[in-house]
Image (tube, rainbow, N blue to C red):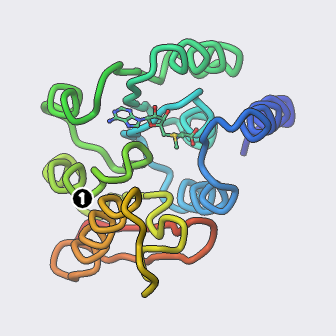
Amino acid sequence: MIDDTAEKTLRGVHDYARQNYIMILSDECERVLRELFAKYKPLRVLEIGTAIGYSSSLMALLSDCTIDTIEKDSERIIKAKQLWQTLGVADRINVFEGDASQILESTTEGKTYDFVFIDGAKSAYKSQLEFLLPHISQGGIVLCDDVLYLGLVRGNEKVVHKHRTIVKNMREFLAYIEDGSLFESTVLEEGNGIAVVKKL
Ligand SMILES: C[S@@+](CC[C@H](N)C(=O)[O-])C[C@H]1O[C@@H](n2cnc3c(N)ncnc32)[C@H](O)[C@@H]1O
């Protein structure tokens, strides 16, 4: 349960992000994240894609978790740190600055997570989840936003060149999570598509 003051602060950051075209999770994904935290109460969380700290703040307020979060943009990290301080959750959030493709290994070395929020580079979802597999506990949950990417991933329409790589990679990601041997998964059509994945 998040207190009213913290909810108010989060709402302000949410509105600021929307007004300034700063990417934060969709409202639909936030609803799913809140439900998952109420159900599973995860304690060890990894996030790829911190941005200005909105979703990490939310997660830190929803459970007593500690969070490792990765972001390549240093200015966003400064904003995120300010928000964590304001909300009193800074001591439970460790931010790792850099390109996830280069620092994911060192960030996660020797660690296991019971909740992973993949919300960084869309083309990398599959390779990141493949890498993270041994770092996710059995029954651990992986949440991914934007998996239907502009409605193009499940559609039949011709994909223009600039979106082709993301769409191809996202289709491979969905095939990977829906194969049934490693995960139980649900892909919700809400927002830009939300995948909820449970490691078997
Ligand atoms: C959708 S935003 C994250 C939003 C955040 N999870 C939230 O809901 O508040 C994606 C973020 O991922 C970061 N990002 C994209 N590619 C990345 C990469 N390869 N390594 C690290 N961060 C990356 C972007 O800079 C951006 O801030």
Q: Nearer the viewer, residue 194 or 36?
A: 194
Report the residue marked by disc 1.
126
Choose top left, top right, bottom left or bottom right for residue 142: bottom left
Q: Image check: 54 left or right of 107? A: right
Left/right placement of residue 62 relative to residue 119 reads right
Residue under the image location 62 percent in, 73 percent down: 190
Query: In the image, is residue 3 above or below residue 185?
Result: above
Considering depth in this image, is 2 or 109 the residue closer to the camera? 109
Inspect this view and state whether residue 44 appears.
no
| Image quarter hosting the N terminus | top right
| Quadrant for the C terminus in the image | bottom left
Spot occupied by residue 180 in the image (x, y as percentages of width and height)? 22, 82
Position of residue 183 relative to residue 101, above or below, is below
**Crowdedness near tag 1: few (<14), some (14–19) or many (≥20) residues, C-alpha within 10 Å:** many
- Can you say whether 29 is above or below 168 in the image? above
| Residue 194 appears in view | yes
Residue drawn 34% across the image and 21% down it: 96
